[in-house]
Image (cartoon, rainbow, N blue to C red):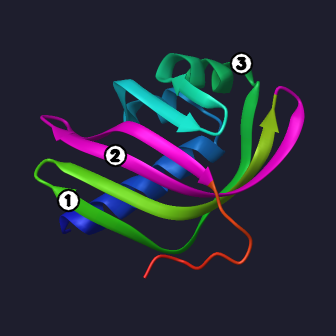
Amino acid sequence: MDDRSEIVELALAWAEAIVANDAAAIGPFMADDWVIIGPDGATARADFLGLVASGDLTHDMMRKVGDARVAFYGATAVYTARVINNGHIRGQRFAADEWTSDVFVRDGTGWKCVLSHVTPAAQGQADID
């Protein structure tokens, strides 16, 4: 398997772990200092996994739309894709259509995500070419 396919498969497996709402399965995809940045600010790995473990954050569905862009910079990969997902956060239903960028770094154990960034997609926005 080439590096691009490995990153695409890794992102798919991570999404499956998120939809399984299993913090123990989600954690291994993330570096210890992982953070996600979104419209509401930054959330650290421990806080994100705590929300999942408590049931305060659940996902019912997460699906990539179109093709992902994967770019490599030495031992760093940047994965960008449009993602549709839905679930609940603290009892409130959400549905999101977002552009997601994940920065992966290869270490001695494989690829780990060090940073995720989500941006709401505009209606009618095109996929990555």
Residue at 39% across, 32% down? 28
Report which residue position mark 1 lands on.
72
Magenta highlight on residue 113: yes
Q: Residue 9, position in %: x, y?
A: 38, 61
Residue beneath disc 2: 103
**Range of the magenta residues?**
90-119
Left/right of residue 116 with respect to residue 99 in the rendered view: left
- Look at 51% across and 26% down and name the residue there: 24
Query: SS for tag 1?
Result: strand
Amino acid found under the numbered disc labelled 1: Phe
Tag shown at residue 54 = 3
Compared to residue 125, the image places residue 98 above or below, namely: above
Q: Is residue 21 above or below residue 78?
A: above
Q: Considering only order in the chain, which callout, 2 or 3, is on the residue closer to the N terminus?
A: 3
Whichever of callouts 3 and 1 sits on the residue coming sooner in the sequence is 3
> In 3D space, how far apart are the residues under numbered discs 1 and 2 (Cα atoms)?
10 Å
Q: Callout 3: few (<14), some (14-19), or many (20+) C-alpha neighbours within 10 Å?
A: few
Q: Residues within 10 Å of mark 1 (few under 14, many from 20)?
A: some
Q: Amino acid at mark 2?
A: Val
Give the residue drawn at x 49%, y 64%. Answer: 81
Along the viewing direction, whichever of 32 and 97 lies nearer the viewer = 97
Residue nearest the observer in this picture, 94 or 117? 117
Give the amino acid at mark 3. Ser
Q: Quadrant of residue 88?
A: top right
Looking at the rendered image, the disc whose residue lies closer to the viewer, 3 or 2, is 2
In the visual, does 68 lie left or right of 109?
right
Foreground residue, 16 or 127?
127
Q: Position of residue 56 (x, y in %)?
A: 76, 24
Q: Nearer the viewer, mark 3 or mark 1?
A: 1
Residue 71 x, y percent position in the rendering: 26, 63
